[in-house]
Image (spheres, rainbow, N blue to C red):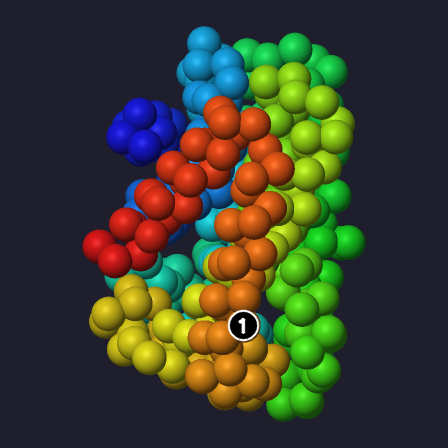
Amino acid sequence: MQRFETYLKSHLLQVKSFHPCYEDALSAMLDAGGKRFRPQLLLEIVEAHEPLLYNSALPVALALEAFHTYSLIHDDLPAMDNAYLRRGMETLHVKYDEATAVLAGDALNTDAFLLIAKAPLRADVKVKLIEILGTNGGSAGMVLGQALDCYFENQSLSLEQVEILHQNKTAKLIAASLQMGAVIVGLSKEIQNALFEFGLDLGLLFQVQDDIIDVTQSSQEAGKTTQNDENKNSFVTLLGLEKSLEYANDLAKKLEGNLQGFDFKTQQALKNAVAHYLWRHKN
Protein backbone atom coordinates (compact mmCIF):
# COMPACT_ATOMS: atom_id res chain seq x y z
CA MET A 1 0.00 0.00 0.00
CA GLN A 2 3.01 2.30 -0.05
CA ARG A 3 2.03 3.39 -3.58
CA PHE A 4 -1.36 4.47 -2.31
CA GLU A 5 0.10 6.25 0.71
CA THR A 6 2.51 8.15 -1.51
CA TYR A 7 -0.32 9.05 -3.88
CA LEU A 8 -2.52 10.23 -1.00
CA LYS A 9 0.16 12.46 0.48
CA SER A 10 0.84 14.05 -2.90
CA HIS A 11 -2.86 14.65 -3.56
CA LEU A 12 -4.07 16.15 -0.30
CA LEU A 13 -6.65 18.87 -0.82
CA GLN A 14 -5.04 22.24 -1.40
CA VAL A 15 -7.29 25.29 -1.34
CA LYS A 16 -5.48 28.59 -0.94
CA SER A 17 -7.41 31.33 0.84
CA PHE A 18 -7.00 33.83 3.67
CA HIS A 19 -8.73 31.43 6.08
CA PRO A 20 -6.21 30.69 8.86
CA CYS A 21 -6.81 26.92 9.13
CA TYR A 22 -9.26 25.75 6.44
CA GLU A 23 -6.64 24.14 4.18
CA ASP A 24 -4.95 22.42 7.12
CA ALA A 25 -8.30 21.06 8.33
CA LEU A 26 -9.07 19.57 4.92
CA SER A 27 -5.97 17.37 4.99
CA ALA A 28 -5.30 16.88 8.70
CA MET A 29 -7.35 13.74 9.25
CA LEU A 30 -6.52 12.19 5.87
CA ASP A 31 -2.82 12.70 6.52
CA ALA A 32 -3.06 11.32 10.07
CA GLY A 33 -3.00 7.73 8.85
CA GLY A 34 -5.60 5.03 9.35
CA LYS A 35 -5.92 1.44 8.27
CA ARG A 36 -6.74 2.38 4.63
CA PHE A 37 -8.90 -0.76 4.54
CA ARG A 38 -11.40 0.45 1.93
CA PRO A 39 -8.83 1.62 -0.64
CA GLN A 40 -6.87 -1.56 0.06
CA LEU A 41 -9.86 -3.73 -0.85
CA LEU A 42 -10.43 -1.86 -4.11
CA LEU A 43 -6.78 -1.82 -5.12
CA GLU A 44 -6.20 -5.50 -4.32
CA ILE A 45 -9.02 -6.45 -6.71
CA VAL A 46 -7.57 -4.19 -9.41
CA GLU A 47 -4.01 -5.42 -8.86
CA ALA A 48 -5.11 -9.05 -9.02
CA HIS A 49 -7.10 -8.78 -12.27
CA GLU A 50 -5.81 -5.76 -14.23
CA PRO A 51 -2.55 -4.43 -12.75
CA LEU A 52 -2.15 -2.00 -15.65
CA LEU A 53 -5.23 -0.17 -14.30
CA TYR A 54 -3.72 0.29 -10.83
CA ASN A 55 -2.60 3.88 -11.36
CA SER A 56 -5.92 4.79 -12.94
CA ALA A 57 -7.69 3.34 -9.90
CA LEU A 58 -5.70 5.40 -7.38
CA PRO A 59 -8.01 8.45 -7.55
CA VAL A 60 -10.98 6.18 -6.87
CA ALA A 61 -9.19 4.59 -3.92
CA LEU A 62 -8.44 8.08 -2.61
CA ALA A 63 -12.11 8.98 -3.08
CA LEU A 64 -13.09 6.06 -0.85
CA GLU A 65 -10.62 7.12 1.85
CA ALA A 66 -11.78 10.75 1.61
CA PHE A 67 -15.42 9.69 1.90
CA HIS A 68 -14.68 7.40 4.84
CA THR A 69 -12.68 10.16 6.54
CA TYR A 70 -15.57 12.60 6.15
CA SER A 71 -17.79 10.09 7.94
CA LEU A 72 -15.31 9.83 10.82
CA ILE A 73 -15.05 13.60 11.19
CA HIS A 74 -18.84 13.91 11.40
CA ASP A 75 -19.17 10.84 13.63
CA ASP A 76 -16.84 12.48 16.16
CA LEU A 77 -18.80 15.75 16.34
CA PRO A 78 -20.39 16.87 19.64
CA ALA A 79 -23.84 16.25 18.14
CA MET A 80 -22.93 12.59 17.60
CA ASP A 81 -20.14 10.81 19.55
CA ASN A 82 -18.42 13.91 20.93
CA ALA A 83 -15.05 12.15 20.62
CA TYR A 84 -11.75 13.90 21.28
CA LEU A 85 -9.27 11.50 19.65
CA ARG A 86 -9.11 9.97 16.15
CA ARG A 87 -6.17 8.34 14.38
CA GLY A 88 -3.97 9.31 17.30
CA MET A 89 -4.67 13.04 16.99
CA GLU A 90 -7.20 15.53 18.28
CA THR A 91 -10.49 15.41 16.43
CA LEU A 92 -11.07 18.39 14.17
CA HIS A 93 -13.73 20.04 16.30
CA VAL A 94 -11.29 19.92 19.22
CA LYS A 95 -8.23 21.02 17.25
CA TYR A 96 -10.04 23.80 15.38
CA ASP A 97 -13.75 24.32 16.03
CA GLU A 98 -17.04 22.61 15.28
CA ALA A 99 -17.90 24.66 12.18
CA THR A 100 -14.49 23.93 10.64
CA ALA A 101 -14.91 20.21 11.33
CA VAL A 102 -18.37 20.13 9.73
CA LEU A 103 -17.16 21.99 6.65
CA ALA A 104 -14.02 19.85 6.29
CA GLY A 105 -16.24 16.76 6.34
CA ASP A 106 -18.57 18.32 3.78
CA ALA A 107 -15.61 19.09 1.52
CA LEU A 108 -14.20 15.54 1.70
CA ASN A 109 -17.65 14.10 0.97
CA THR A 110 -18.16 16.25 -2.12
CA ASP A 111 -14.59 16.01 -3.38
CA ALA A 112 -14.74 12.20 -3.23
CA PHE A 113 -17.16 12.30 -6.16
CA LEU A 114 -15.01 14.90 -7.93
CA LEU A 115 -12.01 12.56 -7.65
CA ILE A 116 -13.97 9.76 -9.33
CA ALA A 117 -15.30 12.09 -12.03
CA LYS A 118 -11.74 13.15 -12.93
CA ALA A 119 -10.18 9.66 -12.77
CA PRO A 120 -8.60 8.41 -16.04
CA LEU A 121 -11.24 5.75 -16.59
CA ARG A 122 -14.05 5.27 -19.13
CA ALA A 123 -17.07 7.51 -18.59
CA ASP A 124 -19.49 4.59 -18.15
CA VAL A 125 -17.20 3.06 -15.51
CA LYS A 126 -17.03 6.36 -13.60
CA VAL A 127 -20.82 6.76 -13.68
CA LYS A 128 -21.20 3.28 -12.19
CA LEU A 129 -18.58 3.98 -9.50
CA ILE A 130 -20.35 7.21 -8.53
CA GLU A 131 -23.66 5.33 -8.38
CA ILE A 132 -22.21 2.64 -6.09
CA LEU A 133 -20.60 5.12 -3.71
CA GLY A 134 -23.72 7.30 -3.63
CA THR A 135 -26.01 4.32 -3.03
CA ASN A 136 -23.99 2.84 -0.20
CA GLY A 137 -22.69 6.03 1.36
CA GLY A 138 -25.87 8.09 1.17
CA SER A 139 -29.42 8.13 2.47
CA ALA A 140 -30.00 4.38 2.00
CA GLY A 141 -26.59 3.34 3.30
CA MET A 142 -24.03 4.84 5.67
CA VAL A 143 -26.12 7.89 6.54
CA LEU A 144 -29.09 5.68 7.40
CA GLY A 145 -26.86 3.62 9.68
CA GLN A 146 -25.63 6.75 11.42
CA ALA A 147 -29.19 8.01 11.83
CA LEU A 148 -30.25 4.70 13.41
CA ASP A 149 -27.18 4.73 15.65
CA CYS A 150 -27.88 8.23 16.94
CA TYR A 151 -31.67 7.96 17.28
CA PHE A 152 -31.68 4.67 19.18
CA GLU A 153 -28.91 5.59 21.60
CA ASN A 154 -29.96 4.53 25.13
CA GLN A 155 -32.59 2.23 23.61
CA SER A 156 -32.14 -1.52 23.26
CA LEU A 157 -32.44 -3.05 19.79
CA SER A 158 -32.66 -6.70 18.75
CA LEU A 159 -29.65 -8.48 17.24
CA GLU A 160 -31.30 -8.30 13.80
CA GLN A 161 -31.80 -4.55 14.18
CA VAL A 162 -28.20 -4.04 15.34
CA GLU A 163 -27.01 -6.00 12.30
CA ILE A 164 -29.11 -3.78 10.01
CA LEU A 165 -27.73 -0.67 11.71
CA HIS A 166 -24.11 -1.73 11.23
CA GLN A 167 -24.63 -3.18 7.77
CA ASN A 168 -25.59 0.33 6.76
CA LYS A 169 -23.23 2.37 8.92
CA THR A 170 -20.07 0.32 8.32
CA ALA A 171 -20.46 -2.73 6.10
CA LYS A 172 -21.97 -1.19 2.97
CA LEU A 173 -18.99 1.08 2.30
CA ILE A 174 -16.62 -1.86 2.75
CA ALA A 175 -18.77 -3.95 0.40
CA ALA A 176 -18.90 -1.06 -2.08
CA SER A 177 -15.09 -0.91 -2.10
CA LEU A 178 -14.90 -4.48 -3.37
CA GLN A 179 -17.68 -3.94 -5.89
CA MET A 180 -16.04 -0.77 -7.20
CA GLY A 181 -12.77 -2.61 -7.73
CA ALA A 182 -14.68 -5.27 -9.67
CA VAL A 183 -16.33 -2.61 -11.84
CA ILE A 184 -12.98 -1.00 -12.69
CA VAL A 185 -11.54 -4.29 -13.98
CA GLY A 186 -14.76 -5.38 -15.71
CA LEU A 187 -15.68 -8.44 -13.66
CA SER A 188 -19.12 -9.91 -14.29
CA LYS A 189 -22.18 -8.65 -12.43
CA GLU A 190 -22.42 -12.05 -10.76
CA ILE A 191 -18.93 -11.67 -9.29
CA GLN A 192 -19.61 -8.03 -8.41
CA ASN A 193 -22.66 -9.10 -6.43
CA ALA A 194 -20.78 -11.95 -4.76
CA LEU A 195 -18.00 -9.57 -3.71
CA PHE A 196 -20.56 -7.12 -2.36
CA GLU A 197 -22.20 -9.83 -0.24
CA PHE A 198 -18.78 -10.97 0.98
CA GLY A 199 -18.04 -7.36 1.86
CA LEU A 200 -21.20 -7.06 3.95
CA ASP A 201 -20.10 -9.94 6.16
CA LEU A 202 -16.54 -8.61 6.22
CA GLY A 203 -17.89 -5.22 7.29
CA LEU A 204 -19.88 -6.75 10.14
CA LEU A 205 -16.75 -8.58 11.30
CA PHE A 206 -14.84 -5.30 11.09
CA GLN A 207 -17.53 -3.65 13.25
CA VAL A 208 -17.64 -6.42 15.88
CA GLN A 209 -13.86 -6.18 16.22
CA ASP A 210 -14.17 -2.40 16.57
CA ASP A 211 -16.78 -2.83 19.30
CA ILE A 212 -14.49 -5.26 21.12
CA ILE A 213 -11.61 -2.77 20.90
CA ASP A 214 -13.84 -0.12 22.47
CA VAL A 215 -14.09 -2.11 25.70
CA THR A 216 -10.67 -3.79 25.74
CA GLN A 217 -8.25 -1.00 24.76
CA SER A 218 -7.49 2.46 26.07
CA SER A 219 -7.87 5.51 23.85
CA GLN A 220 -4.09 5.71 23.58
CA GLU A 221 -3.81 2.08 22.46
CA ALA A 222 -6.62 2.38 19.91
CA GLY A 223 -5.67 5.85 18.66
CA LYS A 224 -9.26 7.01 19.08
CA THR A 225 -11.76 7.64 21.86
CA THR A 226 -12.78 4.33 23.47
CA GLN A 227 -15.04 3.30 26.36
CA ASN A 228 -17.62 5.38 24.49
CA ASP A 229 -20.19 2.80 23.33
CA GLU A 230 -21.98 1.90 26.56
CA ASN A 231 -25.10 3.85 25.56
CA LYS A 232 -24.96 2.72 21.95
CA ASN A 233 -26.22 -0.38 20.19
CA SER A 234 -22.85 -2.06 19.77
CA PHE A 235 -22.49 -5.83 19.54
CA VAL A 236 -20.71 -5.88 22.91
CA THR A 237 -23.46 -3.83 24.57
CA LEU A 238 -26.05 -6.29 23.27
CA LEU A 239 -24.23 -9.62 23.50
CA GLY A 240 -21.47 -9.04 26.02
CA LEU A 241 -17.77 -9.50 25.31
CA GLU A 242 -17.64 -13.32 25.29
CA LYS A 243 -20.66 -13.72 22.99
CA SER A 244 -19.31 -10.97 20.72
CA LEU A 245 -16.06 -12.91 20.35
CA GLU A 246 -18.09 -16.01 19.43
CA TYR A 247 -20.12 -13.95 16.94
CA ALA A 248 -16.89 -12.68 15.36
CA ASN A 249 -15.47 -16.21 15.14
CA ASP A 250 -18.66 -17.45 13.45
CA LEU A 251 -18.47 -14.59 10.91
CA ALA A 252 -14.81 -15.37 10.24
CA LYS A 253 -15.65 -19.03 9.57
CA LYS A 254 -18.47 -17.99 7.23
CA LEU A 255 -16.12 -15.68 5.32
CA GLU A 256 -13.49 -18.40 5.07
CA GLY A 257 -16.06 -20.76 3.57
CA ASN A 258 -17.41 -18.15 1.13
CA LEU A 259 -13.88 -17.29 0.05
CA GLN A 260 -13.66 -20.67 -1.68
CA GLY A 261 -16.36 -19.61 -4.14
CA PHE A 262 -14.07 -17.08 -5.81
CA ASP A 263 -11.37 -17.67 -8.41
CA PHE A 264 -7.76 -17.89 -7.28
CA LYS A 265 -6.87 -14.27 -8.13
CA THR A 266 -9.84 -12.89 -6.21
CA GLN A 267 -9.15 -15.18 -3.26
CA GLN A 268 -5.58 -13.92 -3.06
CA ALA A 269 -6.71 -10.30 -3.33
CA LEU A 270 -9.14 -10.74 -0.43
CA LYS A 271 -6.58 -12.60 1.67
CA ASN A 272 -3.98 -9.88 1.04
CA ALA A 273 -6.38 -7.12 2.04
CA VAL A 274 -7.49 -8.84 5.23
CA ALA A 275 -3.90 -9.74 6.16
CA HIS A 276 -2.83 -6.12 5.63
CA TYR A 277 -5.74 -4.89 7.74
CA LEU A 278 -4.81 -7.26 10.59
CA TRP A 279 -1.17 -6.12 10.40
CA ARG A 280 -2.17 -2.44 10.54
CA HIS A 281 -4.55 -3.30 13.38
CA LYS A 282 -1.66 -4.64 15.46
CA ASN A 283 0.80 -1.91 14.51
Residue at (68%, 38%) from the top-left corner? 194
Where's residue 156, x and y in %?
A: 68, 89
Q: Is residue 130 visible?
A: no
Residue 126 against residue 109 in the figure, above or below: above
Tell which of 9 and 240 is nearer to you. 240
For the N terminus, give its image quadrant: top left
The picture quadrant where one finds residue 140 is: bottom right
Q: Is residue 150 left or right of residue 61?
A: right
The picture quadrant where one finds residue 223 is: bottom left
The picture quadrant where one finds residue 96 is: bottom left
SS of the residue at dot 1? helix
Q: Is residue 259 left or right of residue 134?
A: left
Residue 127 against residue 25 in the figure, above or below: above
What residue type is disc 1 on? Answer: Tyr
Q: Is residue 246 visible?
A: yes
Residue at (39%, 60%) from the top-left corner? 92
Where's residue 24, x and y in %?
A: 34, 45
Residue bearing mark 1? 247
For the C terminus, give its image quadrant: bottom left
**Mark 1 Cα shell of 10 Å, populated few (<14), some (14-19), many (≥20):** some
Where's residue 274, x and y in %?
A: 41, 46
